[in-house]
């Protein structure tokens, strides 16, 4: 692996040669938005049987709702016709296994900088957080009345998506 991005630029050349997205519209064909984790074991479109152009995807550590993500979802609901929203967390999540102190210690150890005031969002109880995020989004008055919000858990060992009942 290269320390710069030359390997990525080279790989992009192959992608460009067979680029599948030339005529794909910007609005999602399945009217769906997925919020999921940035974990590299999740291939969102493949996991959900989607094609290029079927859904919008937002990713962050843990697939968690926060104010910035919630704002993006509201915009996607009104401007991008995303009327189905799936919040999908996953098993073996590093953000769910981490502690605030552990994250701060790792940062300080790697940088030598005091990270005691750094406050990333780690997850204490993953199912509770997922359920709370779904409820929060369902109760957001800025979303259209017809929006459907669902939660799910993706198993990184099997690829199975289990939809949760709140």
Image: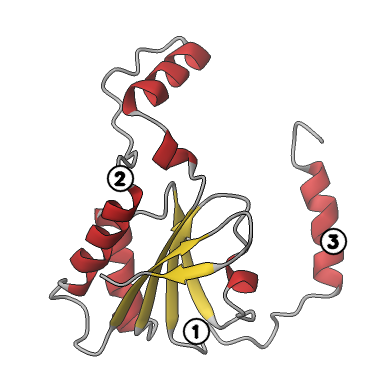
Q: Nearer the viewer, mark 2 or mark 1?
A: 2
Q: Is residue 81 left or right of residue 41?
A: left
Query: What residue is at 84 percent from the left and 75 percent from the top?
Result: 18
Asked whether 80 or 128 is in front, the reply is 128
**Residue position for label 1:** 28
Asked whether 30 or 90 is in front, the reply is 90
Q: State which quarter of the image contains the C terminus.
A: bottom left
**Residue position for label 2:** 125
Asked whether 69 or 91 is in front, the reply is 91
Q: Is residue 160 left or right of residue 152?
A: right
The number of numbered discs placed on residues in the rendered structure image is 3
Instruction: Give the mark, 1 or 3, whose residue is nearer the N terminus.
Output: 3
Query: What residue is at 79 percent from the left and 51 percent from the top?
Result: 9
**Residue position for label 3:** 13
Measure the alpha-carbon separation of dots 2 and 3: 43 Å
- Disc 2 crowd rating (10 Å Cα; few below 14, some 14-19, many 20+) is few
């Amino acid at each position: 692996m290269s320390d710069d991005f030359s390997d990525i630029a080279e790989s992009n050349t192959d992608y460009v040669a067979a680029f599948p997205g030339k005529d794909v519209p910007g609005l999602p064909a399945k009217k769906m938005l997925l919020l999921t984790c940035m974990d590299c074991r999740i291939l969102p479109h493949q996991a959900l049987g989607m094609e290029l152009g079927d859904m919008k995807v937002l990713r962050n550590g843990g697939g968690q709702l926060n104010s910035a993500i919630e704002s993006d979802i509201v915009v996607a609901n009104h401007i991008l016709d995303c009327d189905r929203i799936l919040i999908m967390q996953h098993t073996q999540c590093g953000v769910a296994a981490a502690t605030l102190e552990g994250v701060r210690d790792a940062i300080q150890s790697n940088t030598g900088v005091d990270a005691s005031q750094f406050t990333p969002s780690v997850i204490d109880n993953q199912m509770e957080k997922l359920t709370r995020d779904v409820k929060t989004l369902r109760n957001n008055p800025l979303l259209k009345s017809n929006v459907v919000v669902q939660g799910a858990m993706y198993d990184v060992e099997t690829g199975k998506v289990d939809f949760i009942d709140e």
